[in-house]
Image: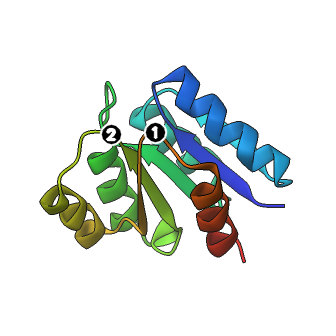
């Protein structure tokens, strides 16, 4: 069982990711934005995967990724980005700063399961 941190302000997307991860036997920690996710990550420090949206209030996904990669405790945690509004250059930039995978919205269940399996192998 893996601990999966989900940073997503859209309740439907958050629930979708959480439901899939739970069905796979993992424990999920849903957060409404990047700031809450960063606080939970720092308080618990024991996550196997972060799934984050990019456009969120308070702290966006880009800043969350930068914070995670800047802290040596979390530098190897896989990060899945999910977004509906990204071009190829935007995606490449996020992968360059430390995201592991990108998933377009609406999310595909099979692709999400594959990324989760790869992250928590």
| Residue 31 can be seen in this image | no
Which residue is found at the position 41% from the left and 37% from the top?
A: 34
Q: Nearer the viewer, residue 8 or 83?
A: 83
Q: Is residue 88 above or below residue 58?
A: below
Which residue is found at the position 48% from the left and 33% from the top?
A: 8
x and y percent of residue 120 in the render? 69, 71
x and y percent of residue 108 in the render? 55, 49
Q: Secondary structure at mark 2?
A: loop
Q: Secondary structure at mark 1?
A: loop
Label 2 vs 1, first from the N-terminus: 2
Q: Are marks 2 and 1 in contact (CB under 8 Å)?
A: yes
How packed mark 2 is, by other alpha carbons closer than 10 Å (few <14, some 14-19, many 20 or more), is few
Q: Which mark is residue 106?
A: 1
How packed mark 1 is, by other alpha carbons closer than 10 Å (few <14, some 14-19, many 20 or more), is few
* CA distance separating discs 2 and 1: 7 Å
- Residue pointed to by mark 2: 84
Q: Nearer the viewer, residue 22 or 105?
A: 105
x and y percent of residue 23 in the render? 83, 47
Q: Is residue 75 above or below residue 61?
A: below
Q: Is residue 49 above or below residue 108?
A: below
Color style of the picture:
rainbow
């Amino acid at each position: 069982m893996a601990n999966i941190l989900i940073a997503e302000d859209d309740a439907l997307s958050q629930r979708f990711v959480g439901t899939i991860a739970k069905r796979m036997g993992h424990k999920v920690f849903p957060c409404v934005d990047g700031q809450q996710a960063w606080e939970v990550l720092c308080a618990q420090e024991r996550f196997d995967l972060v799934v984050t949206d990019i456009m969120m209030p308070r702290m966006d996904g880009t800043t969350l990724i930068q914070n995670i990669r800047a802290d040596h405790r979390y530098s190897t945690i896989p990060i899945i980005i999910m977004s509906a509004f990204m071009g190829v250059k935007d995606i490449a930039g996020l992968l360059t700063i430390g995201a592991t995978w990108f998933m377009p919205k609406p999310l595909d269940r099979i692709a999400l399961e594959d990324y989760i399996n790869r992250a928590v192998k």
